Image: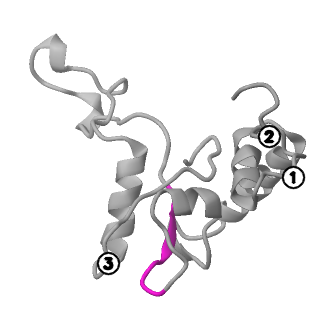
């Protein structure tokens, strides 16, 4: 932005509600945001891993990725475990050459976002997944 542009200043009268929310979510280290995320993380831990949300957690982001507040659009919240992928072998014994003997430092080929979208799509077989966005994470889940 150029100097004097009313873009980033949250107190400027030219900023709309969605822009205000966007700025809010950009500053995740602010006191209010840290409190909100902490409380919500606690709340989400007590809900099922895939559950329907009555409305989007981030309305600005939801609209940007294609959500519209009308019939036929639903919002699901999905929780995915964080961390790498452990090779499922008995007692950690992997036969063959040393190159292929890794057990714990493996990485899953797909990212958490695509895994979450797949789980939401599987839960709602009669619908299609439009898009997704990050809402919260803690040490165990994302």
Residue 7: where, in percent of width, then height? 75, 40
Q: The residue tagged with tag 3: helix, strand or loop?
A: loop
Displayed quadrant of residue 91: top left
- Comparing labels 3 and 1, the label whose residue is closer to the camera: 1
Q: Would you say residue 65 is visible in this rendering?
A: yes
Q: The residue tagged with tag 2: helix, strand or loop?
A: loop
- Look at mark 2 in the image and give the residue it sits on: 6
Give whichever of 134, 12 is nearer the camera.
12
Label tally: 3
Q: Residue at x 51, y 72 (%)?
A: 75
Q: The residue tagged with tag 1: helix, strand or loop?
A: loop
Q: In the picture provided, is 135 more to the left or to the right than 80?
A: right
Give whichever of 44, 135 is nearer the camera.
135
Please tell me which of labels 2 and 3 falls first in the chain. Answer: 2
Please tell me which of labels 2 and 1 falls first in the chain. Answer: 2
Which segment did they paint magenta?
71-79
Q: Residue at x 74, y 44 (%)?
A: 23
- Look at mark 1 in the image and give the residue it sits on: 13
């Amino acid at each position: 932005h150029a100097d004097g542009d009313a873009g980033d200043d949250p107190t400027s009268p030219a900023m709309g509600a969605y822009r205000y929310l966007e700025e809010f979510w950009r500053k995740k280290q602010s006191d209010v945001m840290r409190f909100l995320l902490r409380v919500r993380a606690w709340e989400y831990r007590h809900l099922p891993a895939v559950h329907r949300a009555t409305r989007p957690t981030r309305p600005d982001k939801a609209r940007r990725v294609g959500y519209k507040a009308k019939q036929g659009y639903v919002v699901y919240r999905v929780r995915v475990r964080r961390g790498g992928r452990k090779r499922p072998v008995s007692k950690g014994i992997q036969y063959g050459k040393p190159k292929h003997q890794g057990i714990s430092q493996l990485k899953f080929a797909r990212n958490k976002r695509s895994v979450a979208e797949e789980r939401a799509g599987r839960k709602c077989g009669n619908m299609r997944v439009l898009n997704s966005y990050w809402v919260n994470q803690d040490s165990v889940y994302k």
